[in-house]
Image (cartoon, rainbow, N blue to C red):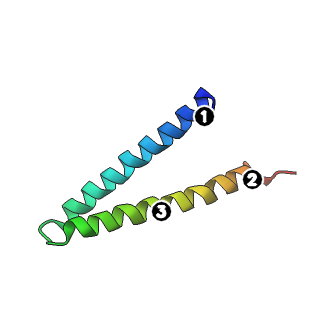
Amino acid sequence: MDQNKLRHISKAVTWRIIASSTTFMLALAFFGDDPQATKKATGVAVAEAVVKMILYYFHERIWFNVKFGRQKK
């Protein structure tokens, strides 16, 4: 694998860790003193990661198939 591809994969993985960790910490703060706060925050972080990956896929597909509001020929 070339260095650029490895760099892009590494960057995507580390960004996902940062983003999901931030979501987890925010959810943990929102759930506060709830005895199930860690479990709930984990669920939110996992759901957020999955949903955002799916949305990103469709976002990429749209951008791949449409150029500035016009269909590619």
Side of 33 relative to 3 (left or right): left
In the figure, 4 relative to 52: above or below?
A: above
Which residue position holds label 2?
Answer: 66
Residue found at the far right of this picture: 73
Q: Residue 45, image x and y in percent?
A: 35, 61
Q: Gap in Å between the C-alphas at discs 3 and 1?
A: 22 Å
For label 2, count other residues whose C-alpha is less than 10 Å away and answer few (under 14), some (14-19) or many (20+).
Answer: few
Q: Are marks 3 and 2 in contact (CB under 8 Å)?
A: no
Q: Residue 48, image x and y in percent?
A: 41, 62
Q: Nearer the viewer, mark 3 or mark 1?
A: 1
Which numbered disc, 3 or 2, marks the residue that appears first in the sequence? 3
Q: Residue at x 25, y 68 (%)?
A: 39
Q: Amino acid at mark 1?
A: Lys
Which numbered disc, 1 or 2, marks the residue that appears first in the sequence? 1
Mark drawn on residue 5: 1
**Viewer-closest of 69 and 16:** 16
Which numbered disc, 3 or 1, marks the residue that appears first in the sequence? 1
**Viewer-closest of 10 and 41:** 10
Q: Amino acid at mark 2?
A: Val
Which residue position holds label 3?
Answer: 50
Side of 39 relative to 49 (left or right): left
Residue found at the far front of this picture: 1
Q: Amino acid at mark 3?
A: Val
Q: Residue 14, image x and y in percent?
A: 42, 41
Mark 3: which secondary structure? helix
Mark 2: which secondary structure? strand
Q: Residue at x 58, y 27 (%)?
A: 3
> In the picture, which quadrant includes the N terminus?
top right
Q: Are marks 1 and 2 in contact (CB under 8 Å)?
A: no
- Is residue 69 something one can see in this rendering? no
Side of 9 relative to 29 (left or right): right
